[in-house]
Image (cartoon, helix red, strand yellow):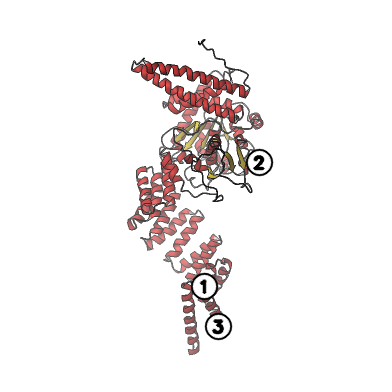
Amino acid sequence: MPNAGQLRSAEHARLLFEQALNLHQRGKLHEAEDRYRSILRAYPEHPDCIHFLGVLRFQQGRSEEALEHISSALRLQPGNIAALANYALVLVTLGRFEQALASYDKALAIEPDYVDALVNRGNILFELKRLDEALVSYDKALAIKPDTVELLKNRAVVLVKLRRLEEALASYEKALAIKPDYVEALANRGSVLTMLKRLDEALASYDRALEIRPGYPDALIDRGWLALLQGRYPEGWRDYESRREVKKLPAAWPKWKGEDLREKRIIVYEEQGLGDGIQCCRFLTLLVARGAQVTFLVRTSLHRLLRAFEPAVRLVDKLPNAEIFDFQSPLMSLPGALNTTLENIPADIPYLYPEEPLVALWRERLGSHGFKVGICWQGRPDYKDEPGRSIPLRCFQPLASVPGVRLISLQKHHGLDQLENLPSDMRVETIGQDFDSGPDALVDTAAVMSCLDLIITSDTSIAHLAGALGRPVWVALKHVPHWLWMFDRTDSPWYPTMRLYRQEVRDDWTTVFRAITDDLTKLQERERRTIDHILIPGSIGELFDRITILTIKAQNIKDPDRLHNINYELRLLRSVEATCGPPGPEVLQLVRELQSINERLWAVEDELRACEQRQAFGEEFIGLARAVYKTNDRRAEVKMRINILCGSQIIDEKSYVSRP
């Protein structure tokens, strides 16, 4: 039993500690530290004083020292749950998650209803991607405090990751029933409703969040994503600008928002993923066409693939020293600044080109036998839009049974382990460890694609590359895909040689691959019935002319069978075009002019047919008929200039009736 002196000492120590703690809680850290140290000189084993001195060190950003102090306190008081929780908190900041979990588990063994420990333990498990365990921890906390809205939101976030969307929505609804103006839950609820394809409700949820907190970035970016997904591009680009930019350049260079670029210098910088970069690098040439001097700040590994843009676009991998630019722009802001709509997407395909020596190398290695189908099934696991996007390799099994088909893996890095457990009747060829093993991204992949008959892939950068090369590519999409692919349509206005296959039911790939297999079988049957490729000579101008006409048809004709035939011919001609190498800037300009001329001819012929239906053969009809031959004369002139610039061996000649 303690004597009177010991009791007085303990009381004195308690009073001193309360004074120090009061200073600490009021934010007077230096004074609190002095008091703690004074107490420890008199009472060197005062556990609370040691513990809170550690907390103070943590607040000062001195985590290692904090850990030492709290550890010492726990040696004196192993059952101090507050110290165990704070010890775990410091460990989390140091990235030592497993040790932090162990500390929370010790605290919970002593006090099972310690809600903060349950919540923080769930947060750690979430970071470690141990989602089922995180959910258990959150549910235990909610059993104790069922009306904690932040906890309901955390639980919903885990359920989304687990693809349990209806349960996630219910969790957000419960949080909003308690706190109707909970902006974060409203924005997240909108995202879940989007994933459930309840689009009107999703939009209402985003709008409500933005009524409460105007300019809230999470709601704006997701509302923009929804608008783009629905093809409402002007609204989508506007809201999409709220995204957090990956890379900042000097603020002295204003962000380009569509101003005149003649004789101006603009630096554009890469952001987001590899596929986004391949999709939107096409806009760089539009800046050049506006008279700008364009510099593209992009990772070194992509320079070789993007070589076709040089010298019109300068490629750099770091900010040029001592240079001044008139404007700067993130790459993904260009579509909005250029007022891109579904009707004017620049889809001059190809705009990337394989290297001919590599094409020759891979053509020899792959051989000419069989119908060669390149496949890719998995993207980067840490990509935010990854859940549900990748496809188990076994889903490709029906394709292997199509007569004559060779499945050739284009997969790199992730997902290769699935090749080890293939069904006995499924063979997937791999093409060696040296495939894209160098520092340059996708140069071998681009060359291999030029040797394949078809590419079938999940939604990865492989799809974008195949589209940019003008190769025939079929893409298997999850139920609610990336905004680029929109809803319902089987084609993409961004990539004319692409066909899209969509999940009708979330996470069901079976029906998707049944449709792909049926179409592949029909394609093979058509190949067997068709006379082997008949090659006829033609001029380069005629090639570009035919491609522009087919592109216009692909944009205007909706009948699936007719569209299939158009895209088939377009793919063949794009393949021929790809062998010619990248055209120069002057040729590109003439091709764009040819596109414009053929668009005019398309419109005039429609107007002529309308006159004929009305039996109106007066001045309007005569004017339109004259416009046809005048426009065709201009078309022939542009084709001639292309032939001369490209050194075409065949020159198209046109005969004119003598005119007075």
Q: In this view, does 288 lie above or below 537?
A: below
The residue lying toward the viewer, choosing from 61 and 311, is 311
Confirm whether residue 411 shows in the render.
Answer: no
The residue lying toward the viewer, choosing from 282 and 467, is 282
Dividing the picture into quarters, in which one does residue 502 lie?
Answer: top left
Q: Residue furthest front?
A: 660
Q: Where is residue 659 in the image (x, y as percent from the top left)?
A: 50, 11
How many residues crowd around disc 3 within 10 Å: few (fewer than 14), some, or many (20 or more)? few
Mark 3, secondary structure of its residue: helix
The residue lying toward the viewer, choosing from 329 and 290, is 290
Q: Distance between the residues labelled 2 and 3?
A: 65 Å
Q: Where is residue 498 in the image (x, y as percent from the top left)?
A: 50, 32
Q: Are marks 2 and 1 in contact (CB under 8 Å)?
A: no
- Residue 42: give its label: 3
Q: How far apart are marks 2 and 1 (CA)?
A: 54 Å
- Residue 438: give its label: 2
**Callout 2, which amino acid?**
Gly
How many residues crowd around disc 2 within 10 Å: few (fewer than 14), some, or many (20 or more)? few
Q: Where is residue 478 in the image (x, y as percent from the top left)?
A: 45, 40
Q: Label 1 belongs to which residue?
A: 29
Would residue 160 be found to the left or right of residue 36 on screen? left
Going from N to C along the chain, the mark reached first, 2 or 3, is: 3
Q: Do the residues labelled 1 and 3 touch (CB within 8 Å)?
A: no
**Callout 3, which amino acid?**
Ala
Seen at 47% across and 43% down, the residue is: 388
Dividing the picture into quarters, in which one does residue 539 lie?
Answer: top right
Mark 2, secondary structure of its residue: loop
Q: Position of residue 252 (x, y in %)?
A: 55, 50
Q: Is residue 245 above or below residue 471?
A: below
Q: How far apart are marks 1 and 3 (CA)?
A: 20 Å
Confirm whether residue 214 shows in the render.
Answer: yes
Going from N to C along the chain, the mark reached first, 1 or 3, is: 1
